[in-house]
Amino acid sequence: MSAAELLEDLRRRDVRLEADGLTLRVDAPKRAATDELHHALRENKRALIRHLERERQRLEVADRRGLVIKWAREPGYLALHDPTTGEWHEVPASGCPPWMLEDAKAHRRRIGDRA
């Protein structure tokens, strides 16, 4: 099982992990604090810390970028950058409020001005 898969499984079981340097802080409900959990954490500690650190850095970059609304490559769709997850989502422009369409147009103008 990869660190990402293990972390996803732990989050489903309400186990929260936090990396602090080489320390892995664990907040787990009593029902989840089993020998199996302790073994999995011990065996995967370094990989989990690396994964959590990459995730933290990605979210910091996403937060700095903020909400971005632009036209997607697919005609008739907008691409939205979610600053809380760093993910991009494409949504049909026909279902978007007018302010989102204006933001996408403004983004296109700003990019055109730079070119």
Image: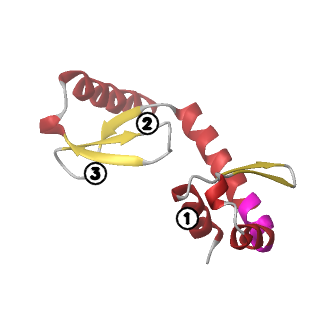
State which mark lies toward you, 2 or 1. Answer: 1
Picture quadrant of residue 40: bottom right
Q: Secondary structure at mark 1?
A: helix
Which residue lies under the disc numbered 1? 9
Picture quadrant of residue 108: top left
Q: Secondary structure at mark 3?
A: loop
Q: Is residue 42 left or right of residue 109?
A: right
Is the stretch drawn in magenta largely helix, strand or loop? helix
Q: Earlier in the sequence, mark 2 or mark 3?
A: 3
Q: Is residue 46 magenta?
A: yes
Name the kind of residue labelled 3 in the image.
Arg
Compare residues 4 and 98 and report the one nearer the observer. Answer: 4
The Cα–Cα distance between marks 2 and 3, rounded to whole angstroms, is 18 Å
**Disc sitting over residue 37 in the figure:** none
Which residue lies under the disc numbered 2? 115
Q: Is residue 57 left or right of residue 39?
A: left
The Cα–Cα distance between marks 1 and 3, rounded to whole angstroms, is 34 Å
**Disc sitting over residue 73 in the figure:** 3
Mark 2 nearby-residue class (10 Å; few <14, some 14–19, many ≥20): few
